[in-house]
Image (spheres, helix red, strand yellow):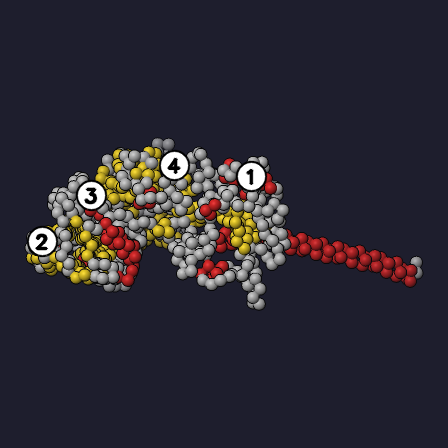
Amino acid sequence: MSVRKKQDQEAGVGLILAIFALLLLSGIALAMVFSSNTETSISVNYRDKHSAIYGALAGLQEARDRIHPLTGDLGVGANLSARGLKIVPTGLPSTSGASGAYVLYLINPAPGETVAPWNPSNKYFDTELCHESYFVNNLGVTGYPTVAAGTPCPATTASVPSGSAWYAWYDNSQSARGTGDAATLEAAYQLKDANGNKIPLTYKWVRITLKSDNMTPVNVGTAPYGNQVCWNGSHEQQLPAGYQTSCTALTTSVTGPVTNIAVTASGSGYTSVPTVTLSGGAGSGATATAVVDQLPQGLTSVTITNPGVGYTSNPAVTITPTDGNGSGAIVNATVSDTEPVVSVGPSGATWATPPACYASGNTPTVIFTPASATATANMTGNSCIYSYQASGSCDGKNDTGAVTANNGTGSGFAGAVTAGSNKKADGSYTPSNPGNYTAVPTTFSVASPCENVSITPTYGIQINTVTIPQNGGGSYTPGSPPTVTFGTYSPKGGLPGAKATLSTGPTGIVNSLTIPVNGGGSGYDANPILIIAAPPCTPGPGCVTATGTASIATDYGVVSITLTNGGSGYSQANPPTVTFSGGGGGSGAQATATVGSSGNTMGPVSLLTALAVTPSGSRAMAQMETGVLYNSYTFGLGGALTLIGPNPNFGTPHSNNFQMIGTDCPTCAPVPSGCNTTALPSIDAIGIDDPTKATNPSAVQTILGDLAKPNNYLGANSAPDVVNANLGNLSASELNLFMGQVASAATNVYGTPTASVNNPTINLGTAANPAIDFVYGNYSMGPSTGYGILAVTGTLTFSGDYSWNGMILVIGNGASIMSGGGNGQIVGGVYVANTSGNSFGSPSVSWNGGGGNGIQYDHCWADYMLSKIPPLVPAASPSALQIISLRTLFY
């Protein structure tokens, strides 16, 4: 073959390979492009679906904001200066649409499109409505399609109620018209770009209805269904008889369910949950369960867990509550001079003579007598002969031969073997001296007549050093160190001897922790943290911080009641009686039930359903149940004397006879007609609530520091019984509104809110006919006796030999001046709060003079008299509507 022909053939093969490679690369490139486009398409679709979901959720949240009864522009807008549009549904949907009984669609079309969810021919038709049983069963709709869950309603007229009165709509895309709050809020929900063009969110509509008990897959309450649903802050329930669509009572005297049970006394000694029984009240069906928990207590014991060492004076002790609850505890630490063990060494030149050899792995324990210090023995490696095994025979019967170590670094080993009657010396032997080696011997020889016996050693270990841990030095009298021995394991050879050396530095240890009289504090519902200050030295074996623990008494009581069924038909004027039984020996728990609007008032539940559709066609639907919350204020006492506000101005007399007592004494004064004289559990002598520091008010310490005779303040806790009352989320405006209720119930009103008076002559009442005196202004009382409720918005001044049987309310300026000198007393309770300007200021109670004037708690003249004051009518909360449930739908 010629060279030319061969080259042509090779060129042809190369061309074929090049073409094949090019085709392969092109195929790979096309596959990569296709794969990339597919992945991008999937990613875009995924993101687009999420955009639709978030759009639907955004529509729900917008509607939730705009239907708020106080701040929403679609509703009443009670807190808006120009009010709202008042188009929010106020009744369940009906085919007539009368009195707000319709479905409201909040539509949000893009420019140029029509959104009409009520129209089956519209692309945004409401495909979820037919799944809500209310529209089928309660609007008289016939021919409604039966559609499986998760399947959209068919776009036919059979899927919606007939006519057009059942729905209303509001176009959110239109420009806000007019002026005022509603127009401003409407505009706030219209997004615009930099050029002012509207950018509507992806939601197309939100359906707004009041919820019925059969609108969702799970019904509320019991049949028959089709009733409106109300929300009481914890659960949904059917609209009770005697209530209107706002879920409030039609009149002030109604029958209905129990809506709240408040614990008035926790009792004590409950080791299991007691049974709660509601009886009377003309109704039936109410059930409830008690919640038992640890009761707030003061400290009862303290324990030293480590006395520390190195103290030169008594250290400070700090008590810190673990959860912020509790205050006032005082613990004193006492230091005594002792010395810790700082080292342990051999009592002679070595630990033992002959050496003490322990089996490998056996570390002896270090024992101090007397016991206080702790230490650990540190062992060597193989350094002695613990035992040896002999094999072979001697020349004669009963012959003995000495065993000698032939090598190794060290000395001292000594041993022997002895033949038996058969001349054999086989067996295990213990050396007479285990020796002491840094490198143990490995070969041994036996002297004649047993030179034919071979030796196999078992090595052992010895004590090298003893270590005292940082907190292990203990405490001993200076000059009297403890004796030291070693235990647990017995060595071969000698017994080790040791001596302890005491520190010559600071020697003080904490030898006692004590709680002084009346120093237990109060309000702790868990064992607090006890911290002892560190000694003034450098941390080490001779300088260790002491530690300890603090404990409260274990006592369990009823802390709350969970209403499981409100029942029906109960009288608001005479609610059912709450009693407790069982509870493992506990007793003393008490509670009161409220019915209808006098308790935890309910609010209507709105069912919001939203559809969102993205420009590329991804759809998502979401649904929310949201309820109106109501603030329900209940006036409560914190103690025989209740102080509300920060930085109280307080002073008390030095008289030995002056007392404030929170122990109930319903027979200390003439009993008002109708009061049960069975004593209630004690309350505190002084209860302070500073809403600005609700969990740990400094005001408690202020009062404790101002008590002239601390032991004279007695009540539910040890003296001085001054506690953080923590009466809930108090507001000054609520207290002022409560004073308005007192004024409305007063038998005598002096002055007006705009025209105050100064020291009027008031009706002091009698035991048989107590008065309710309300003074807009200042009042001064001299030597006399009054009965009932005395409410003063200005400054109250008592002087001389005065007495008052009842409740004294100084709420407004919150200033009270008491000048004693007599033997009169306030039997009932005193409540002082500075609420001027609807904000809390410093309350002032200045008490001076001698005599026995003081406060004695009496539930008949305090709580029973306060029951004459009508409760505040709960008002809608300005907080956002509560989200009861939130879910996505597949329609």
| SS at mark 4 in the image | loop
Residue contact at pointers 2 and 1, CB within 8 angstroms:
no
Residue 561 percent across, percent down from the top left: 31, 41
Tell me how far mark 2 sits from mark 4, CA to CA.
113 Å
For mark 2, give the secondary structure.
Answer: loop
Looking at the image, is mark 2 or mark 3 earlier in the sequence? Answer: 3
Question: Which quadrant is the N terminus positioned in?
Answer: bottom right
> Residue 681 bears which disc, if any?
3
Give the class, few, some or many, for how many residues have Cα within 10 Å of label 3's Cα (few <14, many ≥20).
Answer: some
- As measured in the structure, the alpha-carbon distance from the residue carrying label 3 to the one carrying label 1 is 56 Å
At 86% from the left and 58% from the top, the residue drawn is 12
Which residue ends up furthest to the bottom in the rendered image?
195
Q: Is residue 761 left or right of residue 587?
A: left
Q: Which residue is tagged 4?
A: 426
Nearer-N-terminus badge (2/4): 4
Nearer the observer, 548 or 138 = 138
The circle drawn on residue 30 is none
| Mark closer to the chain start, 2 or 1 | 1
Q: Which of labels 2 and 3 is toward the front?
A: 2
Q: Is residue 685 left or right of residue 471?
A: left
In the rendered view, would you say 222 is above or below 814? above
In this orientation, which residue lies closer to the viewer: 583 or 649?
649
Q: Quadrant of residue 645?
A: bottom left
The residue drawn where x is 50% and y is 51% is 60
Cα separation between marks 4 and 3? 86 Å
Q: Which residue is mark 1?
A: 149
Question: Which mark is nearer the camera, 4 or 1?
Answer: 1
Q: Is any atom of residue 54 visible in this view?
A: no
| Residue corresponding to mark 2 | 784
